[in-house]
Image: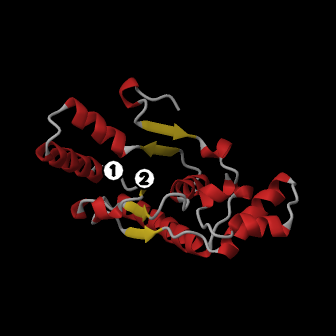
Amino acid sequence: YELPAELKGLLQCEDVSMSFKKSRYYVSEQQKELASKIFRMAEVSQKLMELQIPYKNATLLYGPPGTGKTMFAKYIAFKKALPFCYLNFSRIIDRKLTSGKGSDGEMSRITVTLMQEFDKIPNDVIVLAATNRYDLLDSAFVSRFSIKQEMKPFTTEENQKMIQMFLSDIGYEFDETEINRIVKGTHDQREIMN
């Protein structure tokens, strides 16, 4: 997708129907439950939009790095046949603060502006926000999300299933003891896949 010049570097959009490999993506039970809620909310949002009742299908994903928050958002976009757009708020805030005063007052104005813009999002948009630092989020911003979901690291068994699914899809066999060695001691999905 081609974006306006002022959004380049801040917003990235991709057609996940071309890039997301569903046959390689392991969906945990927690993720299946969450996806089901998001899909139900999409139906409700659509009906409410027809009645001109604003409602946000907004989910806040939080947890440590490498737990699949961004990949889960791509999975949702893929399943709903929607474009995946990634907006990096930290870059926006950094850009505003470095070009402005950099004071707490400036940060408060940025936060209020972001919340006002968030409130303008139409019902038919699915919002998934992801953060590693839930503790730093403004409570008024957090309250705008219908679902707040902690993305926990996969268990050893889930990591093994994730690896097996990926290897099976690419047609590569790997020794079971080697897989166990890789997942032992780490639950960071990104690190394991790397």
* Up-down relation of residue 89 to residue 182 (above or below): above
- Residue 90 rendering spot, x and y as whole percentages: 34, 44
Find numbered disc 1 in the image and state the secondary structure of the residue it sits on. Answer: loop
Which amino acid, by three-letter code, is at mark 2? Val
Given residues 47 and 154, the one toward you in this image is 154
- Inter-mark Cα distance, 1 to 2: 7 Å
> Which residue bears the numbered disc 1?
121
- Residue 179 rendering spot, x and y as whole percentages: 78, 65
- Colouring mode (rainbow / by chain / secondary structure / one colour): secondary structure
Is 56 displayed left or right of 165 in the figure?
A: left
- Residue 85 rendering spot, x and y as whole percentages: 48, 44
- Quadrant of the rendered image containing residue 153: bottom right
Number of disc labels? 2
Which class describes the residues within 10 Å of circle 1: few (<14), some (14-19), or many (20+)? Answer: some
Which amino acid, by three-letter code, is at mark 1? Ile
Marks 1 and 2 in Cβ contact (< 8 Å): yes
Residue furthest out toward the left: 105
Question: Which residue is rendered at x = 60% and y = 67% of the image?
Answer: 187
> Which residue bears the numbered disc 2?
125
Question: Which residue is rendered at x = 82% and y = 69% of the image?
Answer: 177
Residue furthest out toward the top: 5
Given residues 122 and 175, the one toward you in this image is 175
Find numbered disc 2 in the image and state the secondary structure of the residue it sits on. Answer: loop
* Up-down relation of residue 189 to residue 107 (above or below): below
* Up-down relation of residue 95 to residue 186 (above or below): above
- Residue 154's mark? none
Question: Which residue is rendered at x = 58% and y = 62% of the image?
Answer: 188
Is 88 displayed left or right of 24 in the figure?
A: left
- Quadrant of the rendered image containing residue 16: top right
